[in-house]
Image (tube, grey):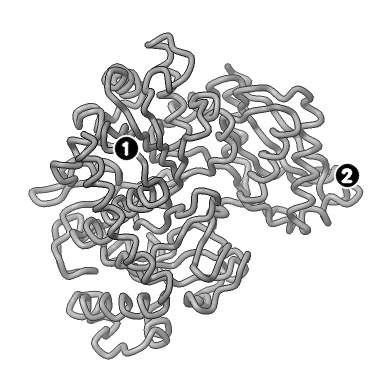
Amino acid sequence: MAIVNSIFTWLMKKRIHQIELFMKYPYDVQEEWFHSLIDSAENTEWGKLYDYKTILSTQQFQERVPIQNYDTLKPYIERMLNGEQNILWPSDIKWFAKSSGTTSDRSKFIPVSQESLEECHFKGGKDMLSIYCNNRPDNQMFTGKGLVLGGSHQVNQLNEDCFYGDLSAVLIKNLPIWAEYYRTPDMSIALMDNYEVKMDRMAEATINENVTSISGVPTWTIVLAKKVLELTGKSNLLEVWPNLELYVHGAVNFAPYREQFKQLIPSSEMYYLETYNASEGFFGIQDQDNSEEMLLMLDYGIFYEFVPLENIGEENPKALLLGEVELHKNYAIVISTNGGLWRYMIGDTIQFTSLAPYRIKITGRTKHFINAFGEEVIIDNAEQALTRACQATGAEIKDYTACPIYFKGENAGGHEWIIEFCKQPDDFDKFVDVLDNTLREVNSDYDAKRFKDMALARPTVHRAACNTFYNWLKAKDKLGGQHKVPRLANERKYVDDILAMMKSG
């Protein structure tokens, strides 16, 4: 196994030179992909509609093609779901990634072409390993297996030629045979859609494997870890899997979970690697082990544009190219891809933390913020404040959500939080004060509204019982990796729903 591990590590590190190339020449690489995408799609129905044959520049493209969202592309995607081809992309689309995002009650079906599978999603997976092998040349990851949590939708057949499942299911079904050999549990368990049964089966199937890496959303990884410890009677995961060395995570901010993972995996050598992989594409990988920023991956068949957060509500907002962005400003990502998404706003907001090379951090969702009083609190603000409040009071958070409290009579407005703790703060009032004061420190609009409690009062914080959010998701039939608790909302729907459940329970 040691020889196999050395060969794999060598193969993975070969890709580093290509990554360094797009880091050095980002505009050339993006320009090249832009022309490749336009040329590829010129004879599709969409390409003819916008006369892609005569588009010679990114400026023409931006002037001619409006910014899209799922609702505007939906009529085209529905025809593709019925088996029509050459609509948005020239190659046959047989796979669709079913995505429900964080709060949407309606499912989205994102087309996954063979090109986006190979040149984007699988390439991202390989690059993640390349970066890890480059940063940890003495790794032993390939001497064991990778535990992959996967999603919650089985692969379903739409018609003779079309299939759908959540992204992880689509990827698992299309993996090469050698990759299947290195992952655990087997496909029959990985693709189960009953998440409660699945967690039990996964724990049973993996406790006797030599697991060297784990990939999954932090929330569900913790649920699985607890099942494994319960089954084995061990006190931490290293007692079950002594060769565990890598945890790959994404989808939610890792900061609130870091302390729990240190307890589950008590080793200073454990490597944590964040990826930014969505149904629409693979966008970023944490390429430095001493920084949580992610390298924006520029050669995956995706052409990027960025809309400043303040322009999002406009009819057809001006989008900036990579060379026009600034550091530490919030942008919504707009992508054109080799899966047939054109000028598609994916709903995430990011900030650039470096411009040479281009590194990013995810700051939230275009729909997930609180701005009932002009305070513009985004998820990044909330998670900085929660992390600091936990550090100050020894608390650990499992899940949370927040929303506005609207003006009532003479009373000021405010923010209402529901927080489920794994470990309660040693001083709850101090926790609320640090949360509040940190929000004031990181967000000047929030601070202005909090001045003398004139527009915003001190936050109202409810402590939720253990498994409140799990039970809420279960009641909504939304258990699983694709479904996430809405962190911030500009309306009261989710908080009121959960409070009602807490009272009745």
- Give the quarter of the figure containing the N terminus: top left
**Residue that lies at the very extreme toward the right in this rendered image:** 452
Which residue is at a point 51% across and 62% down the rendered structure image? 359
Nearest the viewer among 361 and 348 is: 361
User: In the image, is 39 to the left or to the right of 411?
Assistant: left
* Residue 488 locus on image (x, y percent): 60, 45
Q: How far, Cα to Cα, is label 1 from label 2?
A: 61 Å
Amino acid at pointer 1:
Met
Nearest the viewer among 54 and 253 is: 253
Which residue is at a point 43% across and 60% down the rendered structure image? 346
Q: Residues within 10 Å of mark 2 (few under 14, many from 20)?
A: few
- Give the quarter of the figure containing the C terminus: top right
Lower position in the chain sequence, tag 1 or tag 2: 1
The quarter of the displayed image where residue 354 is located: bottom right
Instruction: State the mark number for residue 141.
Output: 1
* Residue 210 locus on image (x, y percent): 29, 25
Which residue is at a point 67% across and 25% down the rendered structure image? 463
Q: Nearer the viewer, mark 1 or mark 2?
A: 1
Which residue is tagged 2? 410
Amino acid at pointer 2:
Glu
